[in-house]
Amino acid sequence: MKSAAIKNTALILAPDEKGQTSIFGVPAVRRLALLCRQSGFEPLLIARRIDLFRLLLSDLLPADAFHHMDDPGRLEGLVAGLAISEKSRLLVLTADLVLDRRSLALFLENSRIPGSHLLTAEEGSCEAAVFVGGPADMAPLLGQLWRNEGHLELPPHIRRTEGVAGLPVRLGDTSESAKIAENRLIAALSSQTEADDGFFSRHFDRRVSRFISRRLAHTPVSPNQITLAGVAIGLTGAFLLSLGGYWSQLAGALLFLFCIIADGVDGEVARLKLRETAFGHYLDVVTDNVVHVAVFAGIAFGLYHDAGDAAYLHALWWMLGGFGLCVVAVYRCILRRTPEELDRSPRLVRLLAMLSNRDFAYLVAALAIVHRLDWFLLGAAVGTYLFAATLWLLGLYEDRRIAPETP
């Protein structure tokens, strides 16, 4: 008979109302419940006033996940009565805590080592903390967390992990604490993309996109709506490029550049509001490629209208063929591999980062300024094949390098 899977449980303690504070339009306690579920933990809410939180979480948590607590002295007994397995991992947080997905993911990865673990904003700090371990180790800390004691008495063997960008942080009684938490969530965004961003993306695009994302995250606008708005801007730029003429091509190139700069907004808003979905990811990937192809075609048709030379249209078909080969090579050499295989193939990861690097939009704008977009079209027509060939050859080399030895 197959044994039942061990459930990992997340206790969210809500001794006061601060967990209702809105962070980018999402109550702090709801953010925690979403993060816990996405991380494989079943959230349970222990609150002094259940009705304050039930409306915020009733669509996420079943009725038996809400537990009323009016006497903190009974807290350990209540937790003991939840029948949490000693073999399961217990995650303990307070409802007024704000943290990002990456900090929690890194913490949970580090906490796979047996024992109790602590996530704090910085080394030596215990004011804002997340705990994970077995129920026996966590029980003595519950009362301290409930009473919101500034300095926690921790077991000496506990292992510590430092969060990202000053997270986690606890909300205070003033609106200023919510602003601090939002600022730290914005700062944490850069750490998630810095390794893969190109020079211009890192030093310019992300500054602009985060400025926009901070404001849109406070509106009802959805990430998918932002994606579609970006597509409209990019396709408008492609249309202007196709008209030919210096000023139309320059306006189209600048619109494409703005589309690229703003491209990160949808993903940033999704992360800030915890609204990331598989559909949104695929929509973003597909629309990005649609805009790229439209811009390439717009450049070719614009050059053809200006010069009347059919060679530009031939170059377009040649480039689209190379683009298709790049797609096949990416699937063959990268997408079909397991994460473990990619970890052992850093060259492939770096090459994929080059492919996803969209700094070329600055080159398009610069060449439009000097009226030499033909250089870009001809260079891309050759470069796509060189890139696909390089990726394919490197993929064959990595296949041989990581292949298990046969007896």
Image: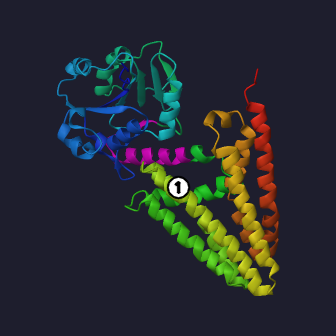
In this view, 195 is above or below 285: above
Foreground pick, 143 / 355: 355
Of 347 and 267, nearer the camera is 347
The image shows residue 223, relative to residue 244, as above or below, that is: above
- SS assignment at label 1: helix
Percent position (x, y) of residue 94?
34, 32
Q: Where is residue 190? Give x, y as percent.
A: 58, 47
Left or right of residue 12: residue 68 = left
Instruction: Give yes or no for residue 170 being in the magenta stretch.
Output: yes
Provide residue 213's location: percent of width, then percent of height.
49, 58
Going 44% across and 48% down the picture, which residue do you hit?
Answer: 182
Lateral position of residue 384 relative to residue 112, left or right: right
Q: Quadrant of residue 387?
A: bottom right
Q: Residue at x 37, y 61 (%)?
A: 220
Residue type at the position of mark 1: Tyr
Quadrant of the drawing holding the C terminus:
top right
Q: Which residue does the numbered mark 1 point to in the structure image?
A: 282
* Residues in magenta, as a range: 168-189
Whether 89 is among the magenta residues is: no
* Vertical placement of residue 153 versus 174, above or below: above
Which residue is located at x 29 percent, y 21 percent? 143
Rendered location of residue 139, percent (x, y): 32, 17
Q: Residues within 10 Å of mark 1 (few under 14, many from 20)?
A: few
- Chief SS of the magenta region: helix
